[in-house]
Image (cartoon, helix red, strand yellow):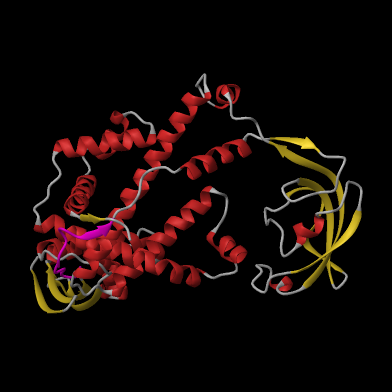
Amino acid sequence: MSSQIISKEGNTVKISFDVTPEKFEEGMKYSYNKNKSKLTVPGFRKGKVPRKVIEAEFGPDFLYEDAVNWVLNEEYPGVVAELNLEVVSLPDIDVKEVGKDIGAKFEATVTVKPEVKLGQYKGIEIEEIPVEVTEDEIKAHFEKIQNDNARLVPVEDRPAEMGDTVNISYAGTVDGVPFDGGQSDSYDLKLGSKTFIDTFEEQICGHSIGEKFDVNVTFPAEYHAEELKGKDAVFAVEIKGITKSELPELNDEFAQDVSEYETFDEYKAKEVEKLTKEKEQKARQKKEDAIIEKVIANAEMDVPEVMYDNRVDDLIAEYEQNMKMQGLTLDAYCKFSGQTVEDLKKQLRPMAKNSVDAKLVIDQIVKDENIEATDEDVQAQIKKYADQYGLEPEKIAQYYESDPGFRQEVALHKAIDLLCDTAVVKAAE
């Protein structure tokens, strides 16, 4: 097999390559085995027609299409590697010649990874990001824990108030006609949660157990159900029960109930330590993002749109996988949220662009700085993942230790560390 670059304009490269008659013959054998069971020739059982008979009956070029596809799948990756091309798109293939005696000659047009010319990437100036946990943040954290562990106490001596949970029955109509999903015999609604549309929850306030009354609301113009968009609706409501949250006291008994600690002071110290670590991690991520954003701005690169398209497709696939785990399909999600897949792609494109641009500049830093991941670096990253996910390092190692992609990922982390270590941090304005 011979190959060469014919031309290069920006990120578009045109190449040519030949496939030997011997290799093409392998493709012909594949094509014959694939197609022989589909053909009917008088005098032969289906699937038992000799190849010579098929070629005589239908012509040798009858088998060419599948043979060409087979040799392309076999040879194209080697051509790309031989020409040292980092291809980022599917090839546009032009079959120039094909035959049993000459093999096959191809030309292909591909889009390749762009050249990246880095600007300043060391000594990037960024604002300091505070990592100290404030008293307000500690207070809010423990208020959430109190609310998560609150018990519901029945209320019988007063009307419903914001913050209460009411058990209601309701039946909704639009222009006097019931609609799908507008009825329930028993529903627990937290007043103030904004679970229901418009002013539904506000109109529950002031009513007591046993009361029956109407709630008048208007569906949003962008509501997911097309037939209800912007429509006025009336809900016949009855309050069947009212409960309020009773928060536990933050004391030693509470600490023993929700943790392994004997005193609240011990429990609080551990929670503050956890909050501090989380804030430090978020600050580190913000620092990295801020630095990389400036490195991208300082760099020169002409990124082909197909790279952004590919990343958007990857993100859509990740969305779809996450939804499957929740028992949803992408189509169902889009219908529920009132958008199309194309709308979702447009929303994800800025994220995809940033992800691609960041990867390009970090890859270039790895190359320019000759950064390599040592065995010690790989083991350190494995331990980090093990600590993060609460797994044994040996279990993580069996998946990643010999993976070249993981080693490259570790090198990227080292490049990011270099950016952070050399950054100039100034006081926040």
Quadrant for residue 83, please give it.
bottom left
Quarter of the figure that contains the C terminus: bottom left
- Could you tell me which residue is drawn at 26 percent across and 71 percent down? 64
Quarter of the figure that contains the N terminus: bottom left
* Residue 266 place in picture, x, y as percent: 47, 24
- Could you tell me which residue is drawn at 27 percent across and 69 percent down? 89
Picture mark count: 0
Relative to 39, 335 lies left or right: right
* Residue 317 place in picture, x, y as percent: 43, 58
Q: Between residues 20 and 58, which one lies in front from this camera angle?
A: 20
- Could you tell me which residue is drawn at 68 percent across and 70 percent down? 220
Vertical order, 41 against 322 (above or below): below
Relative to 112, 249 lies left or right: right
Q: Is residue 70 visible?
A: no
* Residue 129 place in picture, x, y as percent: 33, 52
Relative to 335, 162 lies left or right: right
User: In the image, is residue 114 part of the stretch drawn in magenta?
Assistant: yes
Vertical order, 429 against 282 (above or below): below
* Residue 265 place in picture, x, y as percent: 49, 25
Relative to 142, 180 lies left or right: right
In the image, farthest residue toward the top: 262
Q: Is residue 343 visible?
A: yes
- Provide the major secondary structure of the magenta segment: loop
- Could you tell me which residue is drawn at 39 percent across and 64 percent down? 313
What range of the chain is rendered magenta?
113-127
Q: Between residues 191 and 296, which one lies in front from this camera angle?
A: 191
Q: Between residues 86 and 191, which one lies in front from this camera angle?
A: 191
Vertical order, 250 against 295 (above or below): above
User: In the image, is residue 64 part of the stretch drawn in magenta?
Assistant: no
Quadrant for residue 312, please give it.
bottom left
Q: Between residues 31 and 343, which one lies in front from this camera angle?
A: 343
